[in-house]
Amino acid sequence: MRVREESSRIIKPSYDEDSPPPTTNYIPLGVFDKVTYNTHIAVIYAYRPPTPPYTTLELGLQKALSVYREWAGRLGQDDNGDPVILLNDEGVRFVEASVDSNLNQAMPLKPSESLLSLHPRLKGVLELVQVQLTRFTCGALVVGFTAHHLVADGHSTSNFLVAWGQACQGLEITPLPLHDRAIFSPQNPPHFEFDHTGVEFMNKKVDKLYPLVTNFMDQDREIVVHKGHFTLQFLANIKAKASSMNGSNKPYSTFESLLAHLWRVITKARALSGLETTQVRISVNGRSRLNLPNEYFGNLVLWAFPRAKVKDLLREPLPYAAKLIHDAVVKVDKNYFKSFIDFVSNKVEDEDLIATADMNKSVLCPNLEVDSWLNFPFCDLDFGGGCPYIFMPSYFPIEGMVFILPSFIGDGSIDAFIPLFEDNLPNFKQNCYSIE
């Protein structure tokens, strides 16, 4: 697929005369912003014709940026050297591109390095949002969208994308975002109920001593991103299996059940020593736990870390893994979030700590990191011609970093994007759809 860039420019917010921009110069990063990934994340959306003209998409983006002003700013520091989002309206990158073929002929429906040509680069970028609009000869449009994770989590970013679509259709942007990142006040006195060192944070000295700890034999192994598709029937069966030994009447969720299955299958494919410990990093949305509205704009995610010895994970039946996952997620409750707020507000700077969230690693083995996009409103991103008929993450070949999202087939099935060592893939495929 040869993508030809037609133009690249900066788009800035467009304010109405009766609602000029606020006078605030910057917004300090909140406690949850400081612990997340310091990187751009890219998503791909594809639309069938007819699709709106570039002018409509550009004007809609300008309007959405006037409501979500942070995206048009830049990362910087205040007078004390603390990290902030500068509300300087310097704008976002807007790229127009084309491909001389039909979308169905050119675009891979499975993970491929060619996806990288459908969005701007992710490294060394000042803009906090980038958009690439790629037209195909059939009239289809691909929207490649990148956003800096320090500004907002996936939930907030999805709300912005929906707002962009509303603006393109001439609709009122609703609901409006809640921009106040200073609402997370520490308790007085602080209560450090949980230990956050070695979980969300680690000491800078440890990071410098072991900057990228990976098995040197793994550095030359090829990594492939496999897309697994799980039908409604398979999901129902795996959920029933995972919940078969659950003491309560409430079964485990579809996500917990599928993740338990994938954790075991991936661990088996890796052929790890039975004495090794494997863990999963699972994002947990704090909005409901802290009784905050879904409109809160920023990062509001912590992580659960179920872990087990490899031999126990593979020897015990599926409900064992499902319970580990369920119990770990339940523990990241309101008290855990409050303990984290107190910890960040009182100890992080004093103890010279940095975040453990890191996308610069290429290998996570023996661990996994799982990002669930199951609740993101993909089908609500409508620029006026209907919802996308393809949506997927870009190409992230980080061994062990799994994305789980609703299938664009639209029947309730689920797709999982699973980066593995190429020599582990045959074993994974052999067991992926097997329910013991």
Image (cartoon, rainbow, N blue to C red):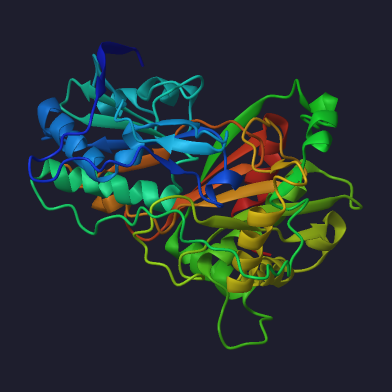
Considering every residue shown, the one lying at the far front of the view is: 79
Which residue is painted at 75% across and 69% down in the image?
317
Q: Is residue 82 visible?
A: yes
Q: In this view, does 174 lie above or below 244?
A: above
The residue at 83%/55% (across/down) is 310
Residue that appears at 84% across and 25% down? 216
Give percent across and percent down for residue 318: 70, 67
Q: Nearer the viewer, residue 20 or 284?
A: 20
Which of 259 and 349 lies nearest the eye of the viewer? 349
Residue sitting nearer the eye, 37 or 326: 37
Q: Quadrant of residue 119?
A: top left
Query: 128 left or right of 418?
Result: left
The image position of residue 74, as x and y in percent, is 41, 30
Q: Can residue 408 be seen in this view?
A: no
Instruction: Examine the rendered structure and indicate whether residue 116 appears above or below residue 129.
Output: above
Question: Going 41% across and 59% down the picture, which residue do you hit?
Answer: 375
